[in-house]
Image (cartoon, rainbow, N blue to C red):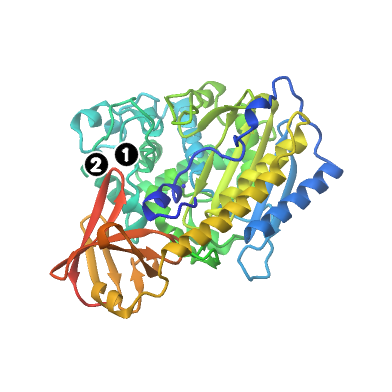
Amino acid sequence: MIGGQRVLALLLPIAIGCGPSPGVRSAGTRDESLVGATPRALDGPRVEALDAFIEHARVTLEVPGASVAVVRGRELVYERGFGERTLGGAQPATPHTLFLIGSITKSLTTMMQAALVDAGTVRWDSRLTDLLPGFAVGDAALTERLVLWHTSCACTGMPQQDVETLLEYGGVSPEARLASMRAMTPTAAFGERYQYSNLMLAAGGFAAAHAFAPELPLGDAYAAALARTVLEPVGMTTSTTDLAVVERSEHASPHGAAIDGTTRVLPLAIEHMVTPIAPAGAVWSSAHELARYAITELALGVAPGGRRVVSAENLLERRRTRVRTDDGSGYGLGVWLGERFDVPILEPAGNSMGFRSQMVALPEHGVAVVVLTNTTGVGGDFADVVQRRALELLFRELEERAEGDLDARAAARRDAIADALSRVVVSPEPAWTQDLAGTYAHPALGELVLSADGTLDAGEWRSRFGQRSEHEGSSAVVLLDPPFAGGVLVVGGDEARRTLTIHQPPHPYELVRVGSTGAR
């Protein structure tokens, strides 16, 4: 659902939502065209070439594990697992290993809504307050205006505002998370510009699910509606939103990089972050089953085996551009839309605390590539180059650029790590950490505890911290460990009123010290 920036304020959008794959649309692709092209068979030497490249890229970029699937002619023609489910473990990743797919969930959610429109349970123009009585945002006029399709168009003017979902999620229910939207207001006019909002999409997913199963709590209603309308008909029989089910199944562990680039295993429970906003990013799936979804998407709503899951009309309603993104691409209803190689392309992608997922689909060619990894940040680079290499092998019209792209990304990663380390004092003076020790609070973020031993405890996750000098002699706390290595909290105030500020749009968050003890 949000992939690999070094600053907390910039990393947050990547933990639960992200945009199209830069690797597929990397510099130099404008002179390549797939108009009229026919994809080649992926067999024999081409399979061997893809196998070798994927493993080479995985080792080069230090990705613990990955699973890859390729669809050609609306048929699954390639699926492989690479590396390990858990770093240092003995269990290999396979095409059936479950990974958290993050914001690819959004396209499944809007497919669920489309199926419910087909069934007459909801309409695209159903008022949100009719579907979800009591729902409101902090703008009465917008609350009154919102209908179902608005929730997934990224065009309402509502901001992303994900800090709350990442720092305060333990035990938070979907109902409570939606109630927090009463304090949120738009930062742009309706339809004025693209603004991604996980909370808004979650509201629409829960609203449609509530219409499907009004007797259930929102989380259970969403799981039931998604399973009945999408997962079961498509044949995604092991895909789930239930972390307890995942724990009992073949699954990958989340990973993230420390500030020095070292990969660390993260606890599975850290991914509970997505539970209160499940329609925006809580689905766990495998490359094998996501390929089945890709085939259904390419076949305009018909699943492998011939079962119609959703009408072509309502499936395509999701693919109408509702707003343009900054790079000239577009956003439909929970689906990234663009044009690459002179042809239309779909690019669902997502990150969570410790996973990166990407899918690229070329509807006119019946081709899709699914890449799942169990790490953030570098997982995006890996997915980009693997998708590029798969397309090169499928289409003779594409030049072989993936190898050079891999080398460039590996070098950029090394440079970024060196730059980050050059700016941070990893072991600050004890006097500095002692001066900061205490409990810091914010009404929306809850509490953070800084200990004199140089540890920050957010409750849901912990990290060692270092020191960085800021402008005019001020300093900042810099997180050293995943999931937010490189995250910055600027130190302010004085001994009487010490503060930590996270600079994240649409506004900064100032946490104020409320207690001097360094223990939770």
Does residue 173 sit above or below 393 in this rendering?
below
Estimate how packed mark 2 is, as few (under 14), some (14 to 19) or many (20 or more) residues with alpha carbons within 10 Å. Answer: some
Query: Which residue, as the protein is rendered here, is positioned at the far right?
Result: 44
* Whole-percent x, y for residue 35 in the image: 69, 20
Which residue is label 1 attached to?
159
Does residue 425 sit above or below 10 in this rendering?
below
Which residue is label 2 attached to?
184
Which amino acid type is marked by label 2?
Answer: Met
- 177 to the left or right of 35: left
The residue located at (78%, 52%) in the rendering is 52
Does residue 3 sit above or below 247 in this rendering?
above
Q: Nearer the viewer, residue 254 or 410?
A: 410
* Whole-percent x, y for residue 249 in the image: 59, 61
* Whole-percent x, y for residue 360 in the image: 61, 37
* Number of marks in the rendered image: 2
The residue located at (76%, 35%) in the rendering is 394
Estimate how packed mark 1 is, as few (under 14), some (14 to 19) or many (20 or more) residues with alpha carbons within 10 Å. Answer: many
Q: Nearer the viewer, residue 305 or 85?
A: 85
Dot 1: element: loop
In three-dimensional space, the C-alpha distance between marks 2 and 1, rounded to whole angstroms, equals 8 Å
- 459 to the left or right of 359: left
Residue 511 is drawn in which quadrant?
A: bottom left
Looking at the image, can residue 310 be seen? yes
Query: Which residue, as the protein is rendered here, is positioned at the far left?
Result: 496
Dot 2: element: loop
* Whole-percent x, y for residue 255 in the image: 54, 62
Which amino acid type is marked by label 1?
Answer: Pro
Q: Nearer the viewer, residue 91 or 450?
A: 450
The dot on residue 271 is none
Disc on the earlier residue, 2 or 1: 1
Are discs 2 and 1 less than 8 Å apart at CB?
Answer: yes
